[in-house]
Amino acid sequence: MLVLFAILTLTGAGSNTLLAAQPQPRGSILFDETLNEYGESRIGSGYAGLARELRSLGYAVDALTQGPITYEKLSQYDAFTIMAPFTPPRSLTTDEIDAIRRFVSAEGGLFMAAVGWSWVSYAKVDIASNPANQIGSVFGIVVNDDVIYDPTDNVGGPSAPTFHQFANHPVATGLHRIGIEGEPSSLSVRGDAKPVVWGDDDSYARSSSTYTYRVGAHPPFAAAVEFGGGRVVYVGHDGVFHDRNLYKYDNLRFALNIFGWLVQTKRTTTVTLIQTVTDVTTEHSVSTLASASVALAAFAFLGGYLLARKRRNKHTVDDDTKIW
């Protein structure tokens, strides 16, 4: 009833102010640049195309250029992205890991991509030290020190596979094939996390001489999990979204699917005040008419309700308190 009263107050005699629902921006995304990300994995360089596409759809896209990573910073956004931490290696602190975990639990989205073999080769440290794996292990997804091979579905060689095996999952909606020119790594997936993109029957993954996944084991390339109130996606090579690969195959759609799914839990509609009917442009006319209809219906409903109460002679002070 308080809502009906508010509507009547705003649309009462002598007032031409209406309530109208105005859509918010689609979501806000923060890209990390504090972990010495690879040069092509920044929104101002190799991800310029991805940032442009996201902004064209109404997303706000920003970069975090100074650490540490804190919950206070993350909480201003719908999704946080860690793409290709590189050298010199910088490990996440315990406080930063806790901040990211808390952010995801509180309905935040987390997107990570990293290449396992490249990290080990260039950073000269164990794959577990990769910042993406430090936090990924919390959610049951880590990248391996290996390369996925496919002798039949590839871009010029077995170590540059294309993927056409997808889960029935929102991040894979409408995908037919994705691929890159580089050497993607496989993922290890446990707990509630599930693969959403994987190699086909003749693909496999191995390091120099050790098989991580043998032929027929379908090495995972991307995985997703829901954690608390939030969501996480991890991909085994950030290059799939670089400018040179973004518009190949269904790579762009894959990226947009991912961010759409990650920010979905925080999407809301804001109610704003339109000051006068004469100030409303054609763009808002539908909202204005809808609001007016709601107000009239509310007025009729409330009038009938009070009349019925009066006739039943059951109107009390307590009831007044509850209504108003």
Image (cartoon, rainbow, N blue to C red):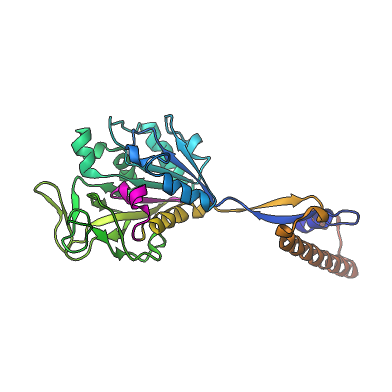
- Number of callouts in the render? 0
The image quarter in which residue 33 lies: top left
Image height check: is 273 above or below 309?
above
Q: Is residue 205 magenta?
A: no
Query: In this orientation, which residue lies closer to the viewer: 264 or 181?
Result: 181
Q: Is residue 273 left or right of residue 246?
A: right
Image point (45%, 33%), residue name: 70
| Residue 312 % position (x, y) | 87, 70
Image point (75%, 50%), residue name: 273
Q: Is residue 231 magenta?
A: yes
Image point (32%, 41%), residue name: 84
Q: Say whether residue 193 is visible.
A: no
Q: Is residue 38 left or right of residue 253?
A: left
Image height check: is 187 above or below 131?
below
| Residue 67 % position (x, y) | 42, 29
Magenta stretch, residue numbers? 228-249
| Residue 259 % position (x, y) | 44, 52
| Residue 286 % position (x, y) | 72, 63
Q: Say whether residue 259 is visible.
A: yes
Query: In this orientation, which residue lies closer to the viewer: 181 or 62?
Result: 181
Q: Residue furthest left?
A: 209
Please identify the quadrant where the N terminus is shown: bottom right
Query: In this orientation, which residue lies closer to the viewer: 115 or 183?
Result: 183
Query: In this orientation, which residue lies closer to the viewer: 217 or 48?
Result: 48
